[in-house]
Image (cartoon, helix red, strand yellow):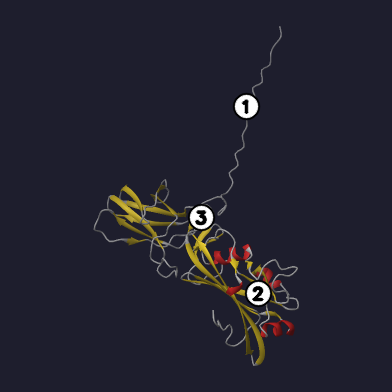
Amino acid sequence: MKKTLIITLIPFFIVITLPAIKGVGVLPAIKGVGVVVKKNPGSGASRLTAPSDENGETTVDITEIGNYNIVPVYPKSSGVELAGGPIRAVKVGLGKSPSGAIKYANQEEDGSFSFNGLAVGSYKIVVLSATENTCPAGFVNIDGVCTLAGKESASPVRGGLLANWGKYGWDGDCNQGGIFCRKWLRLPDLNANRPEENSTTGESKITLEGNVITVTTIGTKGSIGDEFLLTANEKSLKPMPGELPQEMLKDILGNVGLKMPKGKVRINTTDQKVVINDTENRGKKLRIVEVYEKANLSIDGKTYTLQLITTSGRGAGSPKHAGF
């Protein structure tokens, strides 16, 4: 009699849990904003929570059963145009603190979120960006966390310009218009760079005032030759229209919490100007070339002016901002 051996194979699964990576395919947390909480309807005063942490979380104590409106707001000291107003393009969730399930609501036209039937207790509020890897206006994405850029950015992505003054206009290695060739460098590369003849480097300061973005780059290393100075002084430079490098534009706008515009940003010849500044630095007389450029760009339906001020060196009274 034959015996049949039956072998049953039992599937074996290994489950690996990977840690979440902030800023990669996720909704970034909104850090450093207070949330206004008010009963609706009700006569109680509005309450402003403590600023949200790096996970976009803050807490509020509900002392009365009822329906509530929740509004994340820009700090009044943030320097953005909407300071004190509601933050748009965000998601807000609410759950019992510390470990209750978080439920999200849709943002209303006035910027508020409605949560109904809340019981008395402590609640956790979570504020996230509504778009993957993108931050609302006035914020910059730093390692997956939306952080306030402020009126004058602390430059979370610091960088500056390598300006080649010997190859202005359309020239072999220069694929952009303008009075000089520019290359945007992040700070470590900028500091390590040793400018060649007729080239200078300088860290850029980026500010946002209303709808004007200003990038000021003062030359701190390198020098320019007499030939270029003579050409500039005789006003025989021939600016040409061109487009700003995308990597430069991305860092500039990111530092002041703005998105990239659709399409390329072009600088026209009528929006370029050269000024020769005879000045001094530490008692030494010198001649500085100052270049002023501007371009308009549209972001989320709003028009901004991008103003670029670049000098070949540092001196008293420079830059002049003359006629710009």
In this rendering, is residue 228 above or below 208? below
Q: Amino acid at mark 3?
A: Pro
Q: Secondary structure at mark 1?
A: loop
- Secondary structure type for disc 2: loop
Q: Is residue 26 left or right of residue 287?
A: left
Q: CA distance from mark 3 to mark 2?
A: 42 Å
Nearer to us in this view, 145 or 172: 172
2 or 1: tag closer to the N-terminus: 1
At x 57%, y 87%, the residue is 317
Residue at x 38%, y 63% (from the top left corner): 85
Between 130 and 15, which is closer to the camera in this rendering?
Answer: 130
Query: Mark 1 and mark 3: span between their CA atoms?
Result: 41 Å
- Closer to the camera: disc 1 or disc 3? 3
Q: Which residue is mark 3?
A: 28
- For marks 1 and 3 on the same chain, the one whose residue lies earlier in the sequence: 1
Horizontal and vertical percent for residue 18?
A: 59, 46
Of labels 3 and 2, the one closer to you: 2
